[in-house]
Image: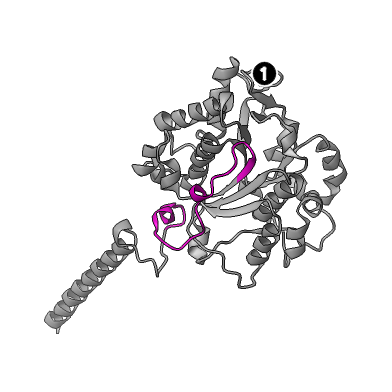
Amino acid sequence: MHFYYKIFLILLIIISLLCTQKLFRINKKLYTDETFNESAQVLPKNTIQCYRMNLDTLPDISKVPPRKDKSIFFHETSCNSFYKGKITINARQACAVESAALLNPNLDVYLLYSSPGVLQFSGDESDKFLRALLSYGNVNILHLDYYKHTKGTPVEELYKSGKLESSDFVVFHASDVIRFTTLWKYGGIYLDLDVIVTKPLNKLPLNFAGIERNDSVNSAILGLASDGIGHSMAEKCLNELKHNFDGQEWAKNGPGLITRVLQETCGVTLAKDMVGRNCDGFTVYPQNMFYPIPGPSWKTLFNKKYLKNIIKETKGSYTIHIWNDISAPRKIPVKSVNSPYLYFARKFCPKVVKAINKYF
């Protein structure tokens, strides 16, 4: 009996090993670019592999080139639309786009998806947001082929080689790289998808950024002309990415990058010393211009008791940054008493707010 028990254990171990090996081969096949199973739609979440998928998608921006220096650009660099099988957007992202379109009717607003996907209006909440945006004549929702967009630019090899994809913060860093590429190509204004525009941006001289802290300029709101100092700044940023891209540090390729380039351009060390200084025609604005509510104070945007104070603090601001990286989990019932964020949303993205089912 003892002999047969040993034989049984040995057979059990062999079967277990064979099953494990088979599962490994299946997983390896699913996660290998060359043999990716598109119908399974299996991708690790922190990835931009979907950019390389040859699937049906929206018209590409390369086929409808924007007017030089007459556009506002938003980039959606996640693979969310690949996972969902269609173009999707959430309420806060849609609010950012609507506020830009509403207050800047003479500028073209581009919402660019790096993820493949098509518009399929099946009646869900996201579809209602997209319809609200498309009701504005100046809104364009297009695909951005990352390979085509970076080809012939200083960062072509950064993407082509796969170095960008090995980043620890790949979706964020893909956005950092592509915003400078887009402004290098077309000129105009770049905005993050977690802002609300509260004043017309076309009143500003095109080459601008704003400080977030005394020691840092942020690249979430950025204006660069297609020629002169704007193009020169964009090219310096792209060359910096080409030679010094860092996939292990979150802010180095965004706020850190524009801060370093402006330190050299303005001849100062601290960001606060760039304000009011002649930086070869580039304007650096004080914090209250674009970031009146600093990151550490983000919770005040969701608390109704701070409404009067925030209205006062943002009176001279052109945008309000919502710090979505940390504020996203905080949901606001759309029928609730005004929190500051919802107050501004009702004012500057009314169609999106009207389309919300339950939470903003």
Q: Please provide percent x and percent y for residue 125.
A: 66, 67
Q: Which residues are magenta?
A: 44-73
In the foreground, 158 or 5: 158
SS at badge 1: helix
Left or right: where 311 falls relative to 288: right
Q: Main secondary structure of the magenta part?
A: loop
In the foreground, 82 or 200: 200
Query: Crowdedness of circle 1 by 10 Å Cα count: few (<14), some, many (20+)?
Result: some
Q: Is residue 63 magenta?
A: yes
Q: Is residue 39 visible?
A: yes
Q: In this figure, which residue is indicated by the disc labeled 1?
A: 273
Q: Is residue 211 visible?
A: no
Quarter assignment of residue 40: bottom left
Q: How many marks?
A: 1
Q: Eyeballing the image, is 301 above or below 21? A: above
Q: Residue at x 45, y 47 (%)?
A: 146
The residue at the far top in this view is 267
Q: Please provide percent x and percent y for residue 317.
A: 77, 36
The residue at the far right in this view is 308
Q: Please provide percent x and percent y for residue 216.
A: 62, 28
Image quadrant containing the C terminus: bottom right
Q: Eyeballing the image, is 309 above or below 96? A: above
Q: Residue at x 65, y 46 (%)?
A: 108
The amino acid type of the residue labelled 1 equals Asp
In the foreground, 49 or 148: 148
In the foreground, 318 or 41: 318
The residue at the far left in this view is 3
Image quadrant containing the N terminus: bottom left
Q: Please provide percent x and percent y for residue 209.
A: 65, 30
Q: Is residue 27 magenta?
A: no
